[in-house]
Image: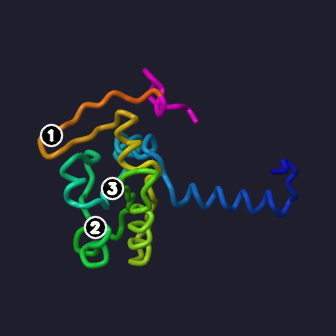
Amino acid sequence: MTTTTTTASTSEAAEHFAAKLRFETDPSDVRAAQVAGEHFTLIDSRGDAAWAQGRIVGAVHLPTAEIAARAVALVPRDLPVVVYCWGPGCNGSTRAALAFSLLGYEVRELIGGFEYWAREGLPVEDDNGPVERAADPLTAPVGAVSCAC
């Protein structure tokens, strides 16, 4: 790998990273938006068994395979959509984001998915109610609100 860049490659890199920030978000930013009362629809695109096992508090369950048929009736078109699936080893949220974008929704993908949401100790529930999880010190600062990045 070379560390030398040219004006063109720097410009291309800036475009790439700007696009990522337009189309992706992370658990702490989504949680901050929830706490601030921002209006958006959070979609859990996983299947029924995954939903029952645990989900982000406030999420709407809409498996990826059902988005094309059910989204218009279930998800307001005038609100941004954030989609998530299991985690970084799963591209289900990418497929879900594509499905929503093809329907004309403003959509962002939650990077890290449910895994990193839960690992950061953010609000999770299952079919029995709230699930308490301590933040994993490898994914979130202990005793701090955010990583300040």
| Label 2 or label 3, whichever comes before in sequence order | 3
What residue did someone put label 2 on? 75
Q: Main secondary structure of the magenta part?
A: loop
| The one of 101 and 4 positioned closer to us in this rendering | 4
Query: Where residue 104 sits in the image (x, y, percent)?
Result: 42, 76
Tell me the quarter of the picture where residue 31 sits. top left
Q: Is residue 26 above or below residue 103?
A: above
Residue at x 26%, y 64% (from the top left corner) = 62
What residue did someone put label 1 on? 129
Q: Is residue 53 left or right of residue 133?
A: left
**Which secondary structure lies at badge 1?**
strand
The residue lying furthest to the top in this view is 143
Is residue 6 highlighted in magenta? no
Chain part drawn in magenta: 138-149
Q: Which disc is residue 37 wearing?
A: none
Query: Where residue 98 sits in the image (x, y, percent)?
Result: 44, 71
Q: Is residue 88 left or right of residue 17?
A: left
Tell me whether circle 2 and circle 3 mark residues in contact (CB < 8 Å): no
Residue at x 28%, y 75% (from the top left corner) = 72
What residue did someone put label 3 on? 42
Q: Amino acid at mark 1?
A: Gly
**Which secondary structure lies at badge 3?**
strand
Residue at x 80%, y 61% (from the top left corner) = 9
Residue at x 31%, y 77% (from the top left corner) = 68
| Label 3 or label 1, whichever comes before in sequence order | 3
Tell me the quarter of the picture where residue 47 sits. bottom left
